[in-house]
Amino acid sequence: MKHIARKRFGQHFLTDGAILDAIVDSIDPKPDEALVEIGPGLGAMTDPLVARCGKLSVIELDRDLAARLRKRPELEVIEADVLRVDFAALAQQRGGKLRIVGNLPYNISTPILFHLLGAVDHVVDQHFMLQKEVVDRMAAAPGSKDYGRLSVMLQWRYHIESVLDVPPESFDPPPRVDSAVVRMQPLPITQAIDAALLEELVRVAFSQRRKVLRNTLGRWLAERQFTGAFDLQRRAEEVPVIEYLGLVSALVGK
């Protein structure tokens, strides 16, 4: 029976063969790699991935789709909400770091990205289909209109590259937005950073984008009796990631 896309799961199934080939080529899966696909759906990307790597773990919330996927012996099906999956534990079970791929539900893509951030040390790379606007924000440089909290929090730990634009007509049903494939490669850690403090600092900094940091982050720093040097006459989007990291280190070491 034909599976009808379920709006509550944000389902848009990729059907363009040329686009699928280009995505799998960019992932370049190899045999014996610990590959995990989020949201395999009807298996459009699953099939060419398995053809190259031999076996695959898939995370699927839709129980009807999960039941279909379980009929395939080359797949290990994890029927679960991806936001509840422990990727660090999954990597340990697979005996190595994970390569994670998927056409992520656009309605919860940002929470998924932040959830995976907590397991970044257990990841080789990530390739995701996302709303193009989200990919633009992820990869944005300081000073651009797209540079924001998402840019800082992800660029802190990943090298981010937009590798392919995908039009709505490549899906069934077509989404109302343009899409893009992003490659995320974890960066080596050069300094220990308090992740919770960085997240709070960045949230405060971008809470009122039109104002200079003196009016937002300045008050937050004053409450912490910070007396170090930091230029608060800029707006949040003008501050490079490395300066936010430096400020966190200074706060911890004061």
Image (cartoon, rainbow, N blue to C red):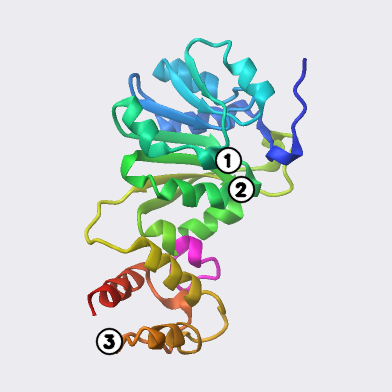
Figure quadrant of the C terminus: bottom left
- Can you tell which of label 1 and label 2 is closer to the viewer? 2
Residue appearing at x 59%, y 17% in the figure: 69
Looking at the rendered structure, the kind of residue marked 3 is Gly
Q: Position of residue 195 (x, y in %)?
A: 36, 61
How far is disc 3 from disc 1 in space, using C-alphas? 41 Å
Residue appearing at x 55%, y 76% in the figure: 207
Task: Write down the region rendered in magenta.
Answer: 140-151
Q: Is residue 146 magenta?
A: yes
Give the residue number, with chain letter if any, for mark 1. 104
Looking at the rendered structure, the kind of residue marked 1 is Leu
Give the residue number, with chain letter if any, for mark 2. 108
Circles 3, 1 touching at the beta carbon (< 8 Å):
no
Give the residue number, with chain letter if any, for mark 3. 228
Magenta: main secondary structure equals: loop
Q: Position of residue 48 (x, y in %)?
A: 51, 20
